[in-house]
Image (spheres, rainbow, N blue to C red):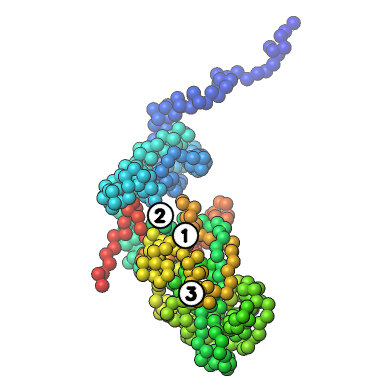
Amino acid sequence: MKDYKETLNLPKTEFAMKANLPNKEPGLLDYWEEIDLYKKLKEKGEGKEKFILHDGPPYANGAIHIGHAVNKTLKDIVIKSQSLSGKYAPYKPGWDCHGLPIELNVEKKKGKAGNKISVGEFRTACRDYAQGQIEVQKQEFKRLGIIGDWDKPYLTMDSKFEAGIVRSLGKIISKGYVKRGDKPVHWCVDCGSALAEAEVEYKDKISPSIDFGFPLDNKTIKSLFNEDIEYPIYAASWTTTPWTVPGNVALTVNAEFDYCLIQVKKDSDTFGLLVGKDLIEMTMERIEIKEFKVLGTCKGSELEGIEAKHPYLERPSKFLLAEHVTTEVGTGIVHTAPGHGLEDYAAAKEYDLEILSPVKNNGTFNSDEEHVGGLFAFKANEKIIEVLSKEKTLFGLADYEHSYPHCWRHKTPLMFRATPQWFIGMSEGSLLNKAKKAITSVNWEPSWGETRMGSMLDRPDWCISRQRAWGVPIPLLIHKE
């Protein structure tokens, strides 16, 4: 009788029953390198239809992680499939070699540039560190079976690459897109630098929210509302950043909104408040006032140009008009510190007001700043609240949870502060429109990539300067005057 095994039609192969990849893969990779597989694939495709994949480079810092592996493997699948389909599909890998993470690692060993080590020596150390990280990642990518021109990668720190960036910058400058200005930017104290929009992440944060007042002259009130009033009157405002009050130069209202003068009694005090009509109830609830009396109403446009007094400093705060004022929250009268906010900055520039920025690079106030000199900005909140209370210009205080910008590296809250920076003006010469038009000509997979890229472009100006030692320099000279 035949053995049943002999009646089975089983495939016969020299393939091993087990893959045993940990042992076999290194040999396969060695064979690919021995026969120069990448060169053979290129030669096979020469003269045929081109398929070019521009590789967004990994950052030269640390071993690769799962994100790198997925990214490079997907690209490798695309390149190999295009090559095997008969196309000329070269692949030139690259590395992003500049930036803060490299600096921070070098600082741990060498100290800060300009302190324990010269800037030139620091840059050399950064270059050496980046080159070492490139070699580590290169071997790890090759171990994944990624084929490409690994002996001739592009590096953003190569002189030719940097020269190309400078030439491109020159073209941008020649078209009038680049400008310099003291504009508010996201500033990280730990980085000691301005941050790009892509380096900012938003997390919930609890901040002290305050309702406070700007004293108004009774003669001004008489001219607006035809009311003779003997008690103090204040323009009511609300903020979640008390530390910005030292930088206040103005109050911003909406020309189309109605604003009411109301009489308020709190404890034994009687005083008047100027508040947006649609925000009276919300404001009264916050400052715990149950009874009030409306004495008169005016349009926001009638307030333009009049002056209130700063809550505790001897200087005026002028009323401005702007469309960013809403009735969603607050009082309808926006405390405006142009050195600490883009909308504030735009409004102040419209009226040619001074741009105050009393906070230094390390996050502390200038030593001569009244009451808060030398204090770290966020820690100055408590002192400013104390001063407002003493001046009787503080009406309400509460914790407020809101979404707040943080540094993506340090996970610490950022400051908006005006510093001298170089910008590419997106509104200059319809640059923004050109960029948006270019986006629509691309086939996006997945489709939400188009929306994400569009939102990144939708900004007034792009800050291109950083206050760091290791990066592509901006070779521009500033007139001494």
Circle 2: residue type: Cys
Residue 193, placed above or below residue 261? above
Mark 2 — residue? 191
| Residue at the farthest top position | 1
Is 140 positioned to the left or the right of 326 in the image? left
Residue 228, placed above or below residue 31? below
Q: Is mark 2 on a helix, strand or loop?
A: loop
Label 1: how many residues lie within 10 Å, few (<14), some (14-19) or many (20+)? many
Q: Disc 2 to disc 3, how far (Cα)?
A: 27 Å
Circle 3: residue type: Thr
Residue at figure coordinates x 36%, y 70% from the top left: 368
Q: Judge whether residue 432 can be spotted in this image.
A: no
Residue 387: x and y in percent read: 48, 72
Residue 101, placed above or below residue 28? below
| Residue at the farthest front position | 268
Q: Tell which of 460 and 402 is nearer to you.
A: 402
Residue 462: x and y in percent read: 42, 63
Mark 3 — residue? 336
Q: Tell which of 279 and 457 is nearer to you.
A: 279
Label 2: how many residues lie within 10 Å, few (<14), some (14-19) or many (20+)? many
Residue at figure coordinates x 45%, y 26% from the top left: 26
Circle 1: residue type: Leu
Residue 125: x and y in percent read: 30, 44
Q: Disc 1 to disc 2, how far (Cα)?
A: 10 Å
Q: Tell which of 311 and 79 is nearer to you.
A: 311
Q: Disc 3 to disc 1, how far (Cα)?
A: 18 Å
